[in-house]
Image: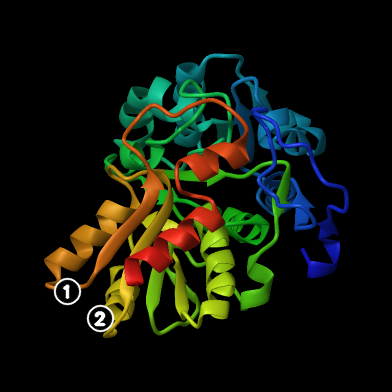
Amino acid sequence: MSKTNATTNTKPKLKTSAMIASIAGEGQATRSAPFGHALVELGRHKQNVIGMTADLGKYTDLHLFAQAFPERYYQMGMAEQLLMGAAAGFAHEGAQPFVTTYAVFATRRAYDFMHQTIAEDNLDVKIVCALPGLTTGYGPSHQAAEDLALMRAMPNMTVIDPCDAIDIEQMVPAIAAHKGPVYARLLRGNVPVVLDEYDYKFELGKAKLLRDGAEVLVISSGIMTMRALEVAKALEADRIGVAVLHVPTIKPLDTETILREARRKGRLVVVAENHTVIGGLGEAVATTLMQAGVSVPFRQVGLPDAFLDAGALPTLHDRYGISASVMGEAIKGWIA
């Protein structure tokens, strides 16, 4: 999809604690339902692609696939375990299921079914889940703060945390070309467009240096790459050079690129993720550095090891340190 298809929100949006609240800032360019549109395009070329959901087609943008290919769409009801088991059965018969639900329901409620019926047999099932991390204000029942840690621990599972609409659009055909199970976080609805400024191309298993900087290296994934780019631009005024290394694939991790950038002298390394600091990208990067004998100043920006509050997303992002403003102040304090 070309850049000209992006739309810009001109009216200020009321920030609420709604489950599907947008993460787009005021005036930020967005694209509507990038996952849904990309999957429809994939379905036109691959007849074995099917869409499956647990009563959340509208809220994961899978309804677009249902409209285009009703004979290849399966609504399984509020039964996530059944959803995963049925997806495994379809994959055994040669279909390529794209399964959607909320991240909490997949990773917490249906974990064993993914583990035993999909991952153990290395089946070609793509599990694409909305409301990752702190992207809803509905509290612990819907905030998937630990999903990456859970999925990283599952053998055979590839794990992806895309940044924006461009990442999602390019991710869909890439994971379809990969044989084996994939867990991908999903931003749904009107999704920000950020990476168009950086000559970006999604490659499975590859990290991308979006911008360079001499004082700080931010290694980030998901919406925190958006925040890191905002911080980097803001800190230019203070003559602080911030490099941003986007890591869309959490597993397998691009250790070669991470080590190459971390070995550059004189930079604080900050890992930023929309996930608990336990078991996610931060610990994966720290382990990579330690095992390679790379000793650098190291900090984490992430969610605490706690059950998070309910409320409006901007308030919660400030409270838990993942907003651009709070993250920028933290970085300035660390290098002072």
Q: In which quarter of the image is residue 202?
A: bottom right
Numbered circles on residues, count: 2
**Cβ atoms under marks 2 and 1 closer than 8 Å:** yes
Depth check: give the residue in front, 168 or 290.
290
The image quadrant of residue 121 is top left
Q: Where is residue 172 in the image (x, y as percent from the top left)?
A: 60, 53
85 or 219: which is nearer to us? 219
Give the mark, 2 or 1, whose residue is nearer the N terminus.
Answer: 2
The residue at 48%/20% (across/down) is 141
The residue depicted at 49 percent of the width and 32 percent of the height is 103
Quarter containing the N terminus:
bottom right
Image vertical order of residue 277 relative to residue 332, above or below = above
Left/right of residue 233 with respect to residue 283 in the rendered view: right
- Residue at figure coordinates x 13%, y 65% from the top left: 291
Question: Is 41 rendered above or below residue 70?
Answer: below
Residue 334, x across and y down, in percent:
33, 65
Residue 263 tag number: 2
**Looking at the image, residue 266 lies above or below residue 270:** below
Task: Measure the C-alpha gap from mark 2 to mark 1.
Answer: 7 Å
Name the residue tied to disc 1.
Answer: 294
Residue 110 makes an appearance in the image: no
Q: Taking the image as drawn, is residue 189 in sight?
A: yes
Extreme residue in the right direction: 10
Q: Is residue 215 left or right of residue 129?
A: left
Disc 1 secondary structure class: loop
**Secondary structure beneath label 2:** loop
